[in-house]
């Protein structure tokens, strides 16, 4: 049983289809960490062009999915309700294997540093426990308006 479904995620972060890349949140410690799931479907809009004969989820969207899981964690803090988490940097991004239709991504992001409105999270994306991508993501909390 998921902790948060898609509707509940959309109450926390501003992303909407087709750019909402987290289906459920399985674990959540507000301001500390979140674990989410993304069921990768052949119907994803990016597969029509990336790549038509061999559909592969773009690495930048895997990173974005990680960031959205992290945004749920940081925006779940009561003082951040209604605000927006913006990308401020990506470092140490590594991709270990392709993500294709039918895969279920487990996205985990842990907040490792926070000072004022700026923070850093360490994220991973896995399929069946196998690491497919990792990165450190810097975020900035904005007003949300």
Image (cartoon, grey):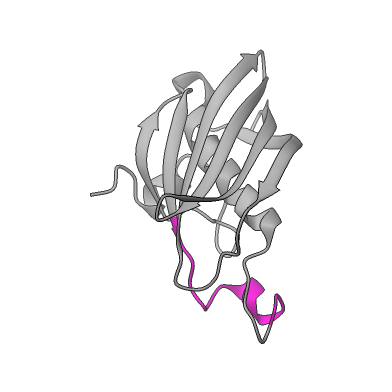
- 49 magenta-colored: yes
Q: Relative to 20, is 24 on the left or the right?
A: left
Vertical relation: 23 (above or below) 49: above
- 100 magenta-colored: no
Task: State the residue in front, 49 or 10.
Answer: 49
- The answer to which image quadrant residue 135 occupies is top right
Q: Relative to 50, is 25 on the left or the right?
A: left
Any part of residue 62 in sight: yes
Locate residue 5, reporting x and y percent: 35, 51
Which residue lies at the image location 57% right of the left edge and 37% below the top edge? 123
Locate residue 15, reporting x and y percent: 57, 51
Total number of numbered discs in the rendering: 0
Residue reaching furthest to the top: 115
Vertical relation: 116 (above or below) 47: above
Which residue lies at the image location 29% right of the left edge and 42% below the top edge? 3
- The answer to which image quadrant residue 100 occupies is bottom right
* Quarter occupied by the C terminus: top right
Task: State the residue in front, 110 or 31.
Answer: 110
- The answer to which image quadrant residue 124 occupies is top right
Locate residue 143, reporting x and y percent: 66, 29
Any part of residue 14 in sight: no
Which residue lies at the image location 39% right of the left edge and 52% below the top edge? 7
Task: State the residue in front, 42 or 13.
Answer: 42
Residue reaching furthest to the bottom: 53
Which residue lies at the image location 66% right of the left edge and 33% below the top edge? 136
Q: Which residues are magenta?
A: 38-51
């Amino acid at each position: 049983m998921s902790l948060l479904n898609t509707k509940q995620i959309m109450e926390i972060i501003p992303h909407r289809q087709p750019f909402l890349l987290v289906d459920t949140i399985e674990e959540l410690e507000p301001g500390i960490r979140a674990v989410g799931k993304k069921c990768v479907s052949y119907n994803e809009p990016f597969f029509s062009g990336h790549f038509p004969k061999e559909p592969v989820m773009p690495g930048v969207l895997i990173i974005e999915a990680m960031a959205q899981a992290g945004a749920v964690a940081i925006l779940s803090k009561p003082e951040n309700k209604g605000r927006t988490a913006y990308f401020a940097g990506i470092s140490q991004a590594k991709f270990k294997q392709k993500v294709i239709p039918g895969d279920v991504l487990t996205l985990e992001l842990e907040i490792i540093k926070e000072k004022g409105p700026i923070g850093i999270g360490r994220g991973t994306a896995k399929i069946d426990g196998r690491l497919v991508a990792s990165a450190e993501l810097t975020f900035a909390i904005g007003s949300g308006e």
